[in-house]
Image: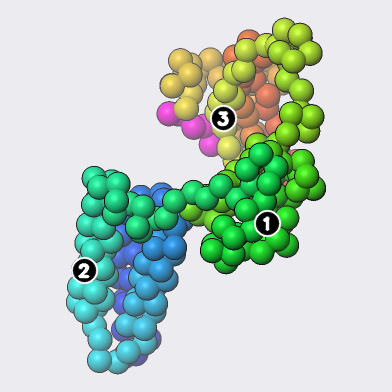
Amino acid sequence: MPFFSIFIELVIGFFALFFITKLLGKTQFAQITPFDFISALILGEMVGNAIFDQEINFLHILFAVGVWGVLIYTVEWLSQRFKSIRAFLEGRPTLVIDKGHIHYNRLKKNMLDLNQLQTLIRAKGHFALNEIEYAILETDGSVSVLPKIKYTPATAEDVNVKGKEVKLPRTFIIDGEILKKDLQEAGFDETWLKQQLKRQHISSHKDVLFCEWIENEGIYAMKYEKSEKTSTK
């Protein structure tokens, strides 16, 4: 029964990879380093090859993923404890533009050319290298920039305007479902939420596509369109 065997191995491989990625943390996907990239590739390749190899069963998959996961976890733990290992595995940020001067040798050392640098700079909202005072090539391949003063957007303090305190929006409803934990963390309950919805002529939270609340501003609720409501049933 090859199909049944593949199905079982896929399910086991899926949960094994899920467990390992949860164990290793979000850095495997967020601030990914060259070492993280290689480890993620090998994990996926390991499970993929094992699934279609007739001589390998699910115990081999679990063993291989488990050993590799322990090795990666150990390396991550050591890198947190010892800075020298962390620098070796993850690398160091590199200052590629210093006081407006481009360090071309540092770019070449990191296998980066000027066209690629321009692309990374544009992703930060600046379309000329001349606008940049400092640029740092991060270990995950992104670039952090500090523009020259004349290219820095003015702030409320710069123009002597008194700004309002920033408030964090809280999402209370998504796709007709109340996010109870977020509601409780904001200090409210479902009774209060239903009262707020009634004020906006909404009889049920199930009719709401999206609802968020901002302190001192109240809630903003968006109802399903009729076509959207029909398609979700």
Give percent across and percent down for residue 202.
Answer: 68, 25
Q: Amino acid at mark 2?
A: Val
Residue plotted at (79% across, 47% down) = 128
Dot 3 falls on a residue whose secondary structure is strand
Answer few, some or many: residues within 10 Å of disc 2's Cα (few below 14, many 20 plus, some between 14 and 19).
few
Image-based side of 112 in relation to 76, left or right: right
Q: Amino acid at mark 3?
A: Thr
* Mark 3 or mark 2, earlier in chain: 2
Q: Amino acid at mark 1?
A: Leu
- Location of residue 229 (image quadrant): top right
Residue plotted at (79% across, 29% down) = 150
* Mark 1 or mark 2, earlier in chain: 2
Dot 2 falls on a residue whose secondary structure is helix
Q: Which residues are magenta?
A: 177-181
**Which mark is in front, 3 or 2?**
2
* Mark 3 or mark 1, earlier in chain: 1
Residue 30 visible in the snapshot:
no
**Which mark is in front, 1 or 2?**
1
Q: Is residue 26 above or below residue 4?
A: above
Give percent across and percent down for residue 149.
Answer: 74, 29
- Is residue 46 part of the magenta span, yes or no? no
Q: Is residue 111 above or below residue 182?
A: below
Q: CA distance from mark 3 to mark 1?
A: 37 Å
Residue 72 visible in the snapshot:
yes
Residue plotted at (46% across, 56% down) = 32
Q: Which residue is mark 2?
A: 67
Kindly identify which numbered label has been placed on residue 171.
Answer: 3
Q: CA distance from mark 1 to mark 2?
A: 38 Å
Residue plotted at (56% across, 26% down) = 170
Q: Which residue is mark 1?
A: 117
Q: Is residue 86 above or below residue 35?
A: above
